[in-house]
Amino acid sequence: MNITDHPLSRIIRTERLPHEFCPGCAIGQVYHYAAKAVEELNLDLNKVVFLSGIGCCSRGVGYVRFDSATTLHGRALAFATGIKLANPELKVIVVTGDGDGAGIGGNHLIHAARRNLDVTVILNNNGLYASTGGQMAPTTQFGAYTSTSPYGNLEDPFDLCNLLNVAGASYVARWTTAHVRPAINAIKKGIQRKGFAFIEIIGQCPTYFGRYLLKTTDPAKCMRWFQENSLRKEVAEKMPKEKLAGKIIIGEFVDREKSELTERYKKLREKLNES
Amino acid sequence: MKYKVSAGLHFMLGNHAVVEGAIAAGCRFFAGYPITPANEICEEFSKKMPKVGGIFIQMEDEIASICAVIGASWTGLKAMTATSGPGFSLMQEGIGYAAATETPCVIVDVQRIGPSTGSIFGQQGDIMQARWGSHGNCYEIIALAPSSVQDMFDLTIEAFNLSEEYRVPVILLAEATVGHLYETITIPKTEKITIVNRKKPSLSPEKFIPYEAPENTAPPMPAFGDGYRVYYTGHLHTREGYPVLSMPKFPLAEKVLRRISKKISLNIDKIVKFETKYVDDAKIIVVSYGFSARAALKAVLEAREIGIKAGYFRPVVIWPFHHQKMREVCASAKTIIVAEVNNGQILHEIQRSVGDSSKVVPLLKFVDTHTPDEILAKIKEVT
């Protein structure tokens, strides 16, 4: 295949292909959704910034043809805060994983949402730390066996969408890699929505999540599992809680109008200059 | 612009002089987190930044502060943060990242005694941390040590200028003693202040290679949004900025890695500044920096009055440390007294500089500052 003929070659740094991800990894899909969203919204590609932290998912940022950065582990949103405040015209998109975004970067995640910073976060949740070899994460299911929970995980996972709702985000949604169009649409909506947008995508890691939790390294089987275990939010709301254990609740959780930080700051400057 | 400090004489707090210096230098982004004894910098920026068209943001911690500063710098603003020991420790990973990505930024460390929380008494304890605090030793930073409120203004401007010229994090190693000092300073007229701005690329985005530059210079730096689509990473990277993850490709990264040190070390004569008095015929030279240097100068003047051939040497730029200059200045001296407020940091650099050719005598205190009498007593003792 001639990789320069990639349908997203305006956006993908095709000269860097082939990429370094495991076969069947969700990360290619997640970046594809993000790239499709940018393309379908017809954004000025010179005004889009992609940021990530460290981890499998964060490596994808080196393959997109935007102003971009692989920042420090967990800190992409802190960098994003500086970038967005310095130039509010830029569309800042953070692509992160669950360990990066919700583990080491959890503090920045909730504070960026609290400030309602106008950025879009796409968090690929594969349920563990993949690039370091399958250790448990704050998103690993209770009881799950990973390389640092050899007797089963003693902790409960974060419900990230719930967390981001409480923290104050303008837009919150969760989909899986088995829900391609809804995931792309959610990213588009998140980019357009003024304020903090958080899109969680449950993505397969056949190498670790598949092998440890689903006993398969077949990506299609992982995605099938996502499909069979997903419940629409509207359906889940009508079900008793005990029946929701182990289910992936998908859909839009928050979509609200709120003023965001750069607007508030702009108003303050105008007020001070008038007085 | 709604706010501008007037030129002329002012009675000003050291920490406030940092803010005035930064604004004069063109700094338009400050991110920080409260910590004593650096709070007045953060507070003053919160008042003034929105009035000068700049950004102030209080972040959730010092890690976030340095990261926001780097992000703002990529986006084209001159940016800084200010902290003290515990926060400075938290910033080290970010400082290394700024060095690796060649991001201009200024970090003010109003030093306080450690280890750990220590207390808020002034110390010069972070000299080595400033130089070596981030992991991996293939990087250089620049650090300056102010000894007066005037220096807090002047050296903040100098810090921004060096940072922009060499695309490097520059650290202002202040002390609680100077940060909380009120004294008179002269604010120069705007046209008398030298301002350096980072070079922008002259090549088109298609031809521009982000990390391509002669080894004694920093490459030009576009801002995010300029259309250059630059990629930054803390990974070892090629001149294009792409990560180097396999050993066979290491030589490509090594070229960039060597340049980020050489752009500083090859320009050491231009970067380093120092003050001297009576060193030419001195038999005893007192080396001191920061606030203690003022006591050292007074002690040397008093020693001269009673016929002792004492001299004074103050490194204004601490890092890079100019060993050759140190050797030249101290050539005639039999004894070198090193007065610093820590357990001995620059002392070891001076020992490395002069070797066995002069005797190096430490005069160390843990907190606050030396008095001229203490230094004079030491001069008399070694005479």
Image (cartoon, coloured by chain):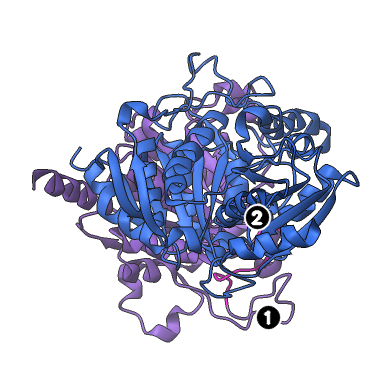
Q: Which mark is residue A152?
A: 1
Q: Which mark is residue B26?
A: none
Q: Secondary structure at mark 1?
A: loop
Q: Give the left or right position of residue B44, taking residue B374 as reference.
A: left
Judging from the image, mark 2 belongs to the subunit labelled B
Q: Residue at left 80%, top 43%?
A: B333
- Closest to the observer: B120 or B95? B120
| Amino acid type, residue under disc 1 in the picture | Gly
Q: Judge whether residue A216 can be spotted in this image.
A: no
Q: Residue at left 65%, top 67%?
A: A214
Q: Colour of chain B?
A: blue
Kindly report the secondary structure that dominates the magenta region of the rendered protein: loop
Quadrant of the frame with the C terminus of chain B: bottom right
Q: Position of residue B359 (x, y in %)?
A: 85, 52
Q: Colour of chain A?
A: purple
- Closest to the observer: B233 or A249? B233
Q: Give the left or right position of residue B267, taking residue B94 as reference.
A: right
Q: Is A111 located above or below residue A151 in the figure?
A: above
Mark 2 = which residue? B127
Q: Position of residue A47 (x, y in %)?
A: 37, 32
Q: Is B44 located above or below residue A37 in the figure?
A: below
Crowd rating for badge 2 (residues with CA inside 10 Å; few <14, some 14–19, many 20+): many
The span picked out in magenta is A130-141
Q: Position of residue B129 (x, y in %)?
A: 66, 56
